[in-house]
Image (tube, helix red, strand yellow):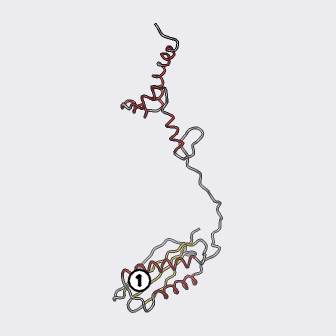
Amino acid sequence: MSDTPEEQPTKQDAPPAPAAKEEDKAAAPAASSKEKSGKGKDKDKAGKGERGTGSQRTSLTKSGGVTSPFGMAPQPKPTMRFMPTYRLEPKNPLNKERVEIIMKAVMNKHYNDEYMFHPKHSLHMAAQISEEIKNRIKLMNYDRYRYIVLVTVGECLMQGLYSMVNFLWDADKDGFVTYKVEQPSYYAICTTFYIYYD
């Protein structure tokens, strides 16, 4: 019994360490499974009296979500909501005649007498023409409309063409405009669909 007073508190601190291990096992079952697997780091922390919950708390703050005051799961950030306008008609309604004039001008500019049909070049040219028509229609600033522009080019080899498109739309506000260029060696058909989007 040659214990000095300084050594006695260390012996008294030793028994609470197993109690801390039991609290850690109850609080974090994942940490206790790591201790059983033989990882030395977790045993060292538990032996020193440190708790494994500090790393769990930092992981919640690193997630970036908004945590509730009661420690529940992180909640997503609120989104911006706008009040409805209750407006059912466009301020600048689409003019079908102007869309047809734009289509005629672009199609006649590109598909003229000098144009020769080639399968690879015609594909890229049709894509450029459809983008040009769509961009020129968008410059008219028709309110709340979306556009689909299809340009079909083919070589005339005594064949027929049958095309069908189905849409579910409002007959009053939605519609389409078609323009066709026909030459002895090729044909080009442009169809523009305009769909009202409120």
Q: Nearer the viewer, residue 80 or 35?
A: 35
Q: Residue 3 at what x, y percent from top left?
A: 48, 10
Within-10-Å neighbours for mark 1: few <14, some 14–19, many 20+ = many
Which amino acid type is shown beneath numbered disc 1? Val
Q: Residue 176 at what x, y percent from top left?
A: 51, 79
Q: Secondary structure at mark 1?
A: strand
Task: Indicate left or right for 95 with 115 as reference.
Answer: right
Which residue appears farthest toward the top when viewing the image? 1
Numbered marks: total: 1
Work out which quarter of the rendered image holds the C terminus and state it.
bottom right
Q: Nearer the viewer, residue 196 or 119?
A: 119
Q: Residue at x 55, y 40 (%)?
A: 72
Q: Residue 157 at what x, y percent from top left?
A: 34, 88
Task: Indicate left or right for 172 with 11 as reference.
Answer: right
Q: Nearer the viewer, residue 34 or 75?
A: 34
Image quadrant assignment for residue 89: bottom right
Q: Residue 19 at what x, y percent from top left?
A: 47, 22
Q: Residue at x 49, y 37 (%)?
A: 55
Is 90 placed above or below 36 here? Answer: below
Where is mark 1, residue-wise? 153
Is 185 placed above or below 172 here? Answer: below
Image quadrant assignment for residue 162: bottom left
Is 106 placed above or below 45 here? Answer: below
Q: Residue at x 55, y 75 (%)?
A: 174
Q: Residue at x 54, y 44 (%)?
A: 74
